[in-house]
Amino acid sequence: MSIALRKPQEIEKLRAANKIVGGALELLRINTKPGITLKELDAMAEEYIRSHGARPSFKGLYGFPSSVCCSLNEVIIHGIPTDYALKEGDVIGYDIGTELDGWYGDAAITVGVGEISSEDEKLIACAKETLYEAIDAIKVGMRFKELSAILEQSILKRGYVPLRSFCGHGIGKKPHDEPEIPNYTDGHSTKSGPKIKNGMVFCIEPMICQTDSKPVILDNKWDVVSADGLRGSHYEHTVAIVNGKAEILSLA
């Protein structure tokens, strides 16, 4: 496994691509209101990305038809935007990728539509708090498997389980690169595998299920739900290891 170590000027290029992702996600968050359709939100984000000189990198990636993954309620990741109009109490996840001058950005959020249940608030908080706990825990020299263990423990202690078969990943001149960063360890030792080093850039993305980790892909070949059929949540940031610490690149 070869994990790239980025020079400071390369990290700045990745920061520029990711800042556009952060801005697009913030735009969607502000406009997440009852009555707006998923296709309208997708078009809004695409216009924002292109107006900032970037390209929506998910559009056409592996055949995905849209700019934004819009994952509604039971859909945890990879939701295709439709004409569905948001309703009070819905939960919607947005995952956005960009490409700017050959460098990629990637991040995700989950938000509630209007007033949501306390159960859904906790579900969303699990993904967000797990993400930030993991970022705060990153240190040069720790192994990526240790990071996976931190993610898993953070999810489990909140009473949820991580979605299996999907994971965080490296990012740079490609949207998905080495290493893979699962949100679980399968009980394996965390004392092997590659270590985190200065200059590495990667995406951490806890994907939360309520009771069953098994993924089910729906008939459109994209929407991923849990086998339990219950709502899920998803948060993601791109981080760079700078001066021994993880620095978030995908903030607005």
Image: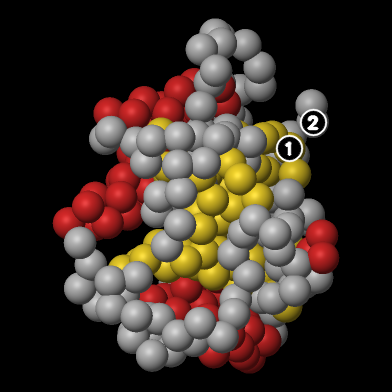
Disc 1: CA contacts within 10 A as few (<14), some (14-19) or many (>=20): some
Taking the image as shown, residue 113 lies to the left or right of residue 63, namely left
**Rendered image: mark on residue 178:** 1
Disc 2: CA contacts within 10 A as few (<14), some (14-19) or many (>=20): few
Q: Is residue 135 above or below residue 39?
A: above
Disc 1 + disc 2, Cβ < 8 Å: yes
**Rendered image: mark on residue 245:** none
Q: Quadrant of residue 170?
A: top right
Instruction: Locate residue 145, reporting x and y percent.
Output: 55, 22
* Residue furthest left in the image: 118
Q: Is residue 118 above or below residue 226?
A: below
Taking the image as shown, residue 122 lies to the left or right of residue 85, namely left
Q: Quarter of the image for the N terminus: give it.
A: top right
Instruction: Locate residue 210, reporting x and y percent.
Output: 37, 41
Please name the amino acid that badge 1 sits on: Glu
Front position in the image: 194 or 39: 39
Q: Quarter of the image for the C terminus: give it.
A: bottom left
Element marked by disc 2? loop
Identify the residue position indicated by label 2 in the image: 2
Please name the amino acid that badge 2 sits on: Ser
